[in-house]
Image (spheres, helix red, strand yellow):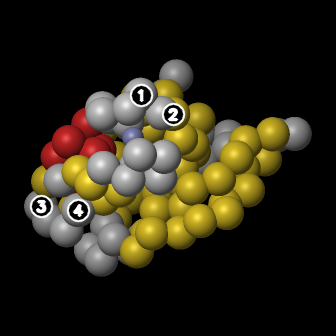
């Protein structure tokens, strides 16, 4: 499955897509994502089975768009978010 950049519509394989995540904010439960192609930065929340794109502000994160990612799993830690898909793992450190 390929995952899209919502700005330039380039589609990425999961390895490339999730490697571009950074700055996990545990309070807002959101990660920053920087497009490897166009440099656009999105804020997103990882759900079980989907990604939620949205905006952070006033101490909360509002999801506006959702992209289904079958098999996606997440595990929150004190200092990081672990993302799992198809037996691969990505570790997004807290900022
Ligand atoms: Zn892009």
Residue 75 can be seen, yes or no: no
Of the numbered discs in the image, which one, if any, rests on residue 39? 1
Q: Is residue 21 or residue 9 the one in the foreground?
A: 9
Residue at (20%, 42%) from the top-left corner? 16
49 up-or-down from 81: above or below? below
Residue at (12%, 61%) from the top-left corner? 87
Whether ligand 1 has any atom under 8 Å from the Cβ at mark 1 is answered as: yes
Of the numbered discs in the image, which one, if any, rests on residue 2? 4
Q: Quadrant of ligand 1?
A: top left
Among all residues in the image, which is located at the extreme top? 95
Mark 3–mark 2 contact, CB under 8 Å? no
Q: CA distance from mark 4 to mark 2?
A: 18 Å
Among all residues in the image, which is located at the extreme front? 8
Residue carrying label 3: 87
Of helix, strand and loop, which one carries label 4? loop
Of the numbered discs in the image, which one, if any, rests on residue 74? none
Classify mark 1: residues with Cα within 10 Å, few (<14), some (14-19) or many (20+). Answer: few
Residue at (49%, 28%) from the top-left corner? 23
- Locate residue 70, reporting x and y percent: 30, 77
Of helix, strand and loop, which one carries label 1? loop
Among all residues in the image, which is located at the extreme right? 58
Q: CA distance from mark 2 to mark 1?
A: 6 Å
Residue carrying label 2: 41
Residue at (48%, 33%) from the top-left corner? 40
Of helix, strand and loop, which one carries label 3? loop
47 up-or-down from 19: above or below? below
Residue 53 can be seen, yes or no: yes
Q: CA distance from mark 1 to mark 4?
A: 18 Å
87 up-or-down from 79: above or below? below
Of helix, strand and loop, which one carries label 2? strand
Classify mark 3: residues with Cα within 10 Å, few (<14), some (14-19) or many (20+). Answer: few
- Locate residue 92, reporting x and y percent: 37, 35
């Amino acid at each position: 499955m390929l995952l899209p950049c919502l700005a330039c519509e380039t589609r990425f394989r999961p390895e490339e897509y999730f490697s571009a995540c950074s700055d996990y904010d545990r309070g807002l439960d959101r990660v920053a994502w920087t497009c490897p192609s166009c440099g656009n930065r999105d804020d997103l929340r990882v759900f079980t089975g989907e990604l939620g794109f949205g905006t952070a502000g006033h101490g909360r994160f509002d999801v506006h768009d959702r992209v289904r990612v079958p098999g996606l799993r997440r595990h929150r830690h004190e200092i990081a978010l672990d993302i799992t898909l198809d037996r691969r793992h990505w570790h997004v450190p807290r900022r």
